[in-house]
Amino acid sequence: MHAKRRRPRISLPKSWPRHVKSAVLHVISLAHYAIVRARGRAESSAGSQERFSAENERLSEECALLREEMRIKDLRMAQIPPQKRPRYRPQERMAILELRAARGWSIKQTADIILITQATVSSWMRRIDEKGPDSLLQLSEPVNKFPDFVRYLVQRLKTLCPGMGKVRIAETLCRAGLHLGPTTVGRILKEDHRLSPDGEAQPSSQVVAAKRPGHIWHVDLTIVPTSAGFWASWLPFSLPQQWPFCWWVGVVLDHYSRRVMGITAFMAPPTSEAVQSFLDHTIEKAGAPPKYLICDKASQFWCPEFMGWCDRKGITPRFGAVGKKGSIAVIERFIRSLKSECLRFILVPPS
C-alpha cells in the first residue's frame, strides 16, 4: 500500500492561542491595507471603467460596513425588554413614520427594524394628527403656515430621497397639488439654518472686512483619504498620511468674491517651501498679492520661513481659530463642500 500523503502543516508560533484576538485585528487591518493599495491604483488608472468599478466596490463595502454597524447596535437594544427600552421623543417618532413612508414598510417591518412593538406603531398612526405642545408626534420644526409646510416637505424629501433633484421634487409636489417651480425648490434646498442656542440667527461679522477682490485671501491644507479611515491595528496605529491612502489638497480662496484663486494636490505632507511655491504660482496668476492672508497655525504657516516670505511679498498674515471672529470659517466651509461634492470625482495621478 502506498503511504498516505501527509498535508504540510503550517508551523505556528509558540503560545499563539494567547494572541488569537490580536491576530484577527491584524488580519483585517492587512486586508484593509491591501484593498486601499489596489483601489489607489484603480483610481489612478486612465480607464474610466476601472475607476467606476473601484467606486462601485467602495460603495458596496460602505453599505456592508453600515449594515454591520446597525446589526451591532440593534443587538444591544434587542437584549432589553420592549417595556424597558428608552422612549423616542415626539420628533423622533415623526421621523420614524416619515422613514416608513419613504421605505414602504408595513407595521410589522417597521416594528422589527426600529425595535418597537406593532401596537406602538399602530398607536402612532392613530394619533398622528394630534395638536398641541403635548402631542405624541411632532415635527422637528414648528410648521404653522403653508410656506413653512412646503419648506419642511421639500427639505425632508431631499433628505429621505437624495436622488431626487429640484425638478423631480417640483413635479412630485405638483402631483400632490402644491405648485412650486424648480428654482423655488432649489432656493429652499440652499437655505442654511444656522441658529444660536436661543433660536436667533448668529451674526456674521469679521474683524477684517474685505473691501474688494484680492484684498483678503484664505489658505488652508486638508487631507482627503482615498478610503474611509487611517487606523491600523499595528504601530503607530494609523496608515501613512500619503498616497495611495490619501492626498493633501491646498486651497486659496478670495474672501470678497469667494473665488478659488488656486488649488493643488500633494502626495505627502507639504513643507513650508512647497506651500510658498504654490502661493507664488497663485499670486503670479492673480497678478498681485493680497493685503491679508488668513490661515491656521499649522507647521507650514506658523514658522519663521513663512513669516519671512510674507514680509518679502508685503502680505500681512492673520492666524484664525475655528469658532472665533476673523477665523478661517469661509475656507473650511468651502473645503467641506469640496470634499462632499467634488473630490470623489477628481482623478489625482500618483506621479
Image (cartoon, rainbow, N blue to C red):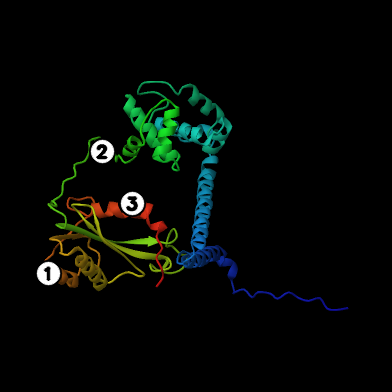
In the drawing, what numbered circle is on residue 263?
Answer: none
Q: Residue furthest bottom?
A: 2
Q: CA distance from mark 3 to mark 1?
A: 32 Å
Q: CA distance from mark 1 to mark 2?
A: 42 Å
345 left or right of 109 in image: left
* N-term-proximal mark, 3 vs 1: 1
Q: Nearer the viewer, residue 326 or 339?
A: 339
* Residue 140 visible: no
Seen from this angle, which residue lies furthest right?
1
Placement of 18 over or under 178, stated as above or below = below
Q: Earlier in the sequence, mark 2 or mark 3?
A: 2
| Mark in front: 2 vs 3 | 3
Label 3: which residue?
A: 337
- Kindly indicate whether the residue at mark 2 contacts the one at mark 1 (C-beta within 8 angstroms): no
Location of mark 1 (residue)? 311
**What's under tag 2, amino acid-wise?**
Pro
Q: Residue at x 57, y 35 (%)?
A: 109
Q: Position of residue 11 (x, y in %)?
A: 64, 75
Residue 297 position in % (x across, y down): 22, 62
Under mark 1, the amino acid is: Asp
The image quarter in which residue 239 lies:
bottom left
Residue 197 is marked as 2
- Of tags 1 and 2, the one toward the viewer is 1
Q: Which mark sits nearer the N-terminus, 1 or 2?
A: 2
Q: Residue at x 50, y 63 (%)?
A: 32
Res 313 seen here: yes
In terms of depth relative to the viewer, which is nearer, 118 or 155? Answer: 155
Q: Residues within 10 Å of mark 1 (few under 14, many from 20)?
A: few
Residue type at the position of mark 3: Ser
